[in-house]
Image (cartoon, rainbow, N blue to C red):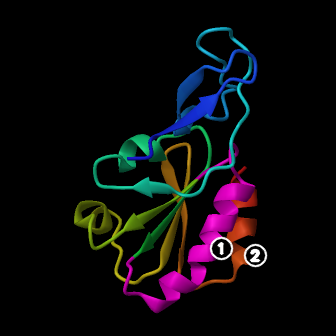
Amino acid sequence: MNEHIIVTCPGCGVKNRVPINRMNNAPKCGRCKTPLPVPSAGPVVFSDQNFDSLVNSPMPVLVDCWAPWCGPCRMIGPVIEQLAKEFGGQAVIGKLNVDENPLTSQKYGIRSIPTLLFFKNGQLADTLVGAVPGEQIRQKLLSLL
């Protein structure tokens, strides 16, 4: 899915595939070793297949557990989009569709959506349930940095 980001080197123009969970490790161009700019990408798409590898990041991780039919999920969707851009390179922020990924939903006991899972060093650090204010989500992320 979106486990990698393509970053164009400002020095030589080569496109580099950088794993999302290594974006804060000062990535360098594979050809000329110029430091790569950290893009402010949108939310990562989490799935049953990539969940564990993305959560095991040196950066804090925020996972929005949602479903397309959920009204409150659609309400906080733009907040998640904004936070993904704001914290690009500092945190991994993404979305997990609970209808399409039942294994991860069961593993973390997701019973109500939206549920926000916060991870630090690969471990679940906190959970918020419901359409909480964007500032509350931002503060929680800041506390994990």
Q: Which residue corresponds to mark 1?
A: 79
Q: Is residue 54 visible?
A: yes
Task: Give the SS element for disc 2.
Answer: helix
Q: Quadrant of residue 79?
A: bottom right
Q: Nearer the viewer, mark 1 or mark 2?
A: 1
Q: CA distance from mark 1 to mark 2?
A: 9 Å
Q: Tell which circle, 1 or 2, labels the residue nearer the N-terminal end.
A: 1
| Magenta region, residue range | 67-92
Above-or-below relation of 129 to 53: below
113 is higher (above) or lower (below) than 11:
below
The answer to whether 112 appears left or right of 17 in the picture is left
Verify CB contact (< 8 Å) between mark 1 and mark 2.
Answer: no
Q: Residue furthest top?
A: 32
Badge 1 local density, few (<14 within 10 Å), some, or many (20+)? some
In terms of depth relative to the viewer, which is nearer, 115 or 73?
A: 73
Q: Which residue is mark 2?
A: 135
Residue under the point 73% across and 32% down:
37
Examine the residues drawn in magenta and state their main secondary structure. helix
x and y percentages locating residue 105 in the rendered image: 31, 67
Relative image position of residue 7 (x, y in whole percent): 61, 32
Helix, strand or loop for disc 1 = helix
